Amino acid sequence: MPTILVVDDEQLLVKGLKRSLEQEGYRVLTAHDGVEALQVFQSEAIDLVVLDVMLPGLGGLEVCARIRREKMTPIIMLTAKGEDVDRIVGLELGADDYVVKPFNTRELVARIRAVLRRARATDHTAANGIMEIQGLTIDGPKRKVYVRGVEVDLTAKEFDMLHLMVANPGRVYTRENLLEAVWGSAYYSDLRTVDVHIRRLREKIEENPGKPEWVLTKWGVGYYFKEKM
């Protein structure tokens, strides 16, 4: 039974969402501010976090950043603004999905189910083994990445994108391809979501992100991993 942490200062929203998720078979823990959220996260085994951006005191973006420094637990962020800047900042900090208030509870439950399903599916399909390409090592079963022997910390989405492209070197993926393959066909978002994740991935694995060696751009089309030499 997956455990979900719902963090929002709107108590009626939390109560309703908790009831809906429990009806779906999830174990649900709740918090109403950032400090309480981190306390619960650190004391419980959490499988996914639903996190509001606008929290009293310690904000949702800071909570997201602190969680990411500890674990790669999936995070779905909520906001009443719906502004691009919040969406991009949330994704840069490692959020896996983004839902704008007011939202349909069924849609959010579907997003939660999809994120958890993709996380489990990736764990199984990653059993193809270890891929090594000129100093870059992707350990599929352990979901770890090493650059010249040094482990780098990737979010779940960054790992999934890299693993997909490395397994198919030279194949160009459009932004739509990557959204569907990594986020799922039910995911709706600005295509810049992909650009943000590609930039962050390059910053972590490339020696010179401005002149990438591995994750390359096909201008006007999309992204691809360089073909083996």
Image (tube, rainbow, N blue to C red):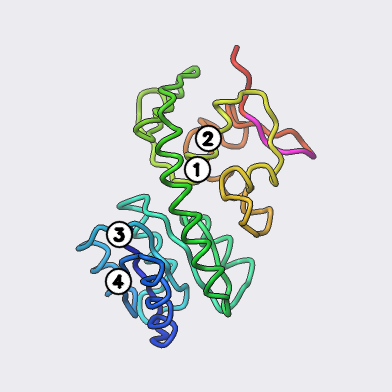
Q: Residue at x 38, y 76 (%)?
A: 18
How far is the residue under mark 4 from the one under mark 1? Answer: 27 Å
Span colored in magenta: 220-224
Mark 1 and mark 2 in contact (Cβ < 8 Å)?
yes
Crowd band around label 3 with a 10 angstrom C-alpha radius: few (<14), some (14–19), many (20+): some
Q: Residue at x 35, y 65 (%)?
A: 26
Residue 53, position as x, y percentages in the image: 47, 73
Residue 95, position as x, y percentages in the image: 48, 58
**Residue at which label 3 appears:** 46
Q: Residue at x 38, y 74 (%)?
A: 7
Looking at the image, residue 172 lies above or below residue 53? above
Q: Is residue 177 left or right of residue 37?
A: right
- Amino acid under disc 2: Leu
Q: Earlier in the sequence, mark 4 or mark 2?
A: 4
Crowd band around label 2 with a 10 angstrom C-alpha radius: few (<14), some (14–19), many (20+): many
- Amino acid under disc 1: Glu
**Residue at which label 1 appears:** 158
Q: Nearer the viewer, residue 38 or 206?
A: 38
Quadrant for the N terminus in the image: bottom left
Of labels 3 and 2, the one closer to you: 3
How far is the residue under mark 4 from the one under mark 2? Answer: 32 Å
**Residue at which label 2 appears:** 162
In what element is the residue under mark 3?
A: loop
Mark 1 and mark 4 in contact (Cβ < 8 Å)?
no
How far is the residue under mark 3 from the one under mark 4? Answer: 9 Å
